Amino acid sequence: MRVALIQQNPTVGALASNVDALLDAAARARAQGADLAIASELVVPGYPPRDLLDRPAFLRAIEEANERIVASVPEGLVLVFGTVVRNEETTGKALFNAAIVARRGQVLTVAKKRLLPSYDVFDEERFFEPGRTSASFEMGGERVALIICEDAWNDDPSKLVEAGAPPSESLRVRYADNPVADVLKTKARLLVNLSASPFTLSKMRARPELFADIARRHGVALAFVNQVGGNDELLFDGRSTLFAPDGSILARARAFGDDLILADLDEGGPVRPDLESEEQAAYEALVMGLRDYVRKCGFERVVLGLSGGIDSALVATIAADALGPENVLGVAMPTRYSSEGSRKDARDLAENLGIAFREHSIESIFESYLQSLMPLLEELGEAREGDVTAENLQARIRGAVLMAISNRTGAMLVNTSNKSEAAVGYATLYGDMCGGLAVLSDVPKTMVYRLSHWVNRNGERIPHSSIVKAPSAELRPNQTDQDSLPPYELLDQILELYVEDGLSRDEIVAKTNAPEVVDRVIKLIHVSEYKRRQAAPGLFLTKKAFGIGRRMPIAQAFRG
């Protein structure tokens, strides 16, 4: 049996172009001798479609797309593709997350996803009902069994812990059913898993180990076909893989890009190079995520502020690689507090990357704000200790300047704040929090340094001085981040333990021996929730990101 793995980057809601790309890949697969071609979960509507599934017109369009695909499967090919189907046994909106198995003009069977995740970033129970039975079909006298994404993750949840999965992912033991065990009672030679499995750094190794273990324990070949691309905050790495019954890799698609690979169940096929490090994986994920977000939202170019610091330098580098340097504009906006070294670093970065650059002083605007506002502010009361009014004015002026450039040029403003800053509120609402996408919002500061060194591994792109100098917002004389924050190494450790791993205050103190810092950081995390609720969407990389997968109340008092 010659199998094609179709790794596709669908745009949510772009049904016509998604179907065109699927049928084109199916035709190429057949031309190369494939007997069976497999696409990813919900490849027709794109994943996740979210509340588009509440729109009757959208559901009708999906049904029309399904009919078009079934009618257009190339002769001699069996095509498996992920889509939405209605439950014809009920009235109203009863939907399945499904996989249709089709020959030219004929539906052989329909598999319906049985385990519907509703934790972290997932909310499938909101839209779908679970399938009750597993599905399989026969090809050339051999049985092929079907499961969809989450259906595979309850076969042996202990393996998740062994593979280093975070607590939030090992909670999948909650499911009572085991679709893998059920469907393999058919004595299938090949187990097919259609997935739209979002990328996280913890899944980079955990996911392939999990699927290899399933193949090995059940003695069955396993075809894992994953979505690729960025859809809003979620990033999909692809890396679709055909595993042999002993768990070894017979074929593998590339990471973070469309691909079509053909493999024989006995002899295998191409094995694309895999990700070599967390730094490479994180960087390529961010490049893909920014590219897809910008283009799928209808933009072509981006603009961002360049402070001369490491965060904006890394985002500018990502943007240049994602969109081409000709589509990136960096803007420096110095005031009386901006050092000549930072201004030079911003210019040098732009020259290194080949992006457009403008320097526009906001000193006169800042001064006019001070002249206009200070009499009023002094009437209202004396400045409190730690007053940041003047600092925030500078940040908000810069936000207004960048938005004006965005309005005039049509370029999307890209936000440059990192996860460490977002966690503790070290950012200004309506100032440096402006933007259409926060590229680094799930990248802790310590990882910003790691990625910057990785970017410079073959030569200086980010100026060395931007990496080694003490980080500073340069909003007052001689300011550094550590005037207001704990050392980033300790801060990021606490954030990982508290936000990502869910440890209690006492457990974190036991690990860090820094009770006062832990108490302060936990307090800052909670009092900054209102800021994050108003922040730009950000790309997800870690075990737990701020955003759709972390739904904390704003007004709450628990600090444990």
Image (cartoon, grey):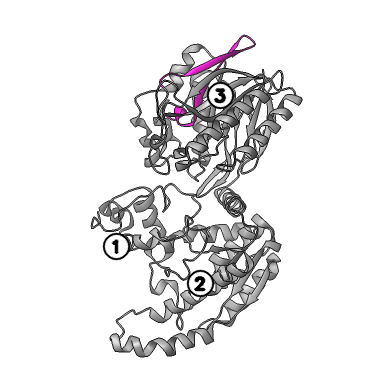
On the image, numbered disc 1 is attached to which residue? 523
Q: Position of residue 193 (x, y in %)?
A: 53, 27
Q: Disc 2 versus disc 1: distance between alpha carbons?
A: 27 Å
On the image, numbered disc 3 is attached to which residue? 100
Residue 182 visible at all: yes
2 or 1: mark nearer the eye: 2
Q: Disc 3 versus disc 2: distance between alpha carbons?
A: 48 Å
Q: Nearer the viewer, residue 21 or 210?
A: 21
In the image, residue 135 above or below residue 370 = above
Residue interval drawn in magenta: 132-153
What kind of element bears circle 2? helix
The quarter holding residue 356 reads: bottom right
The residue located at (55%, 39%) in the rendering is: 46
Q: Disc 3 versus disc 1: distance between alpha carbons?
A: 50 Å
Position of 518 with respect to 137 (left or right) is left
Task: Assign the C terminus to one quadrant of the image.
Answer: bottom left
Dot 3 or dot 2, earlier in sequence? 3
On the image, numbered disc 2 is attached to which residue? 399
Position of 170 with respect to 340 (left or right) is left
User: Do labels 3 and 1 touch, CB within 8 Å?
Assistant: no
Q: In the rendered structure, find residue 391 and report the number of the disc placed on it.
A: none
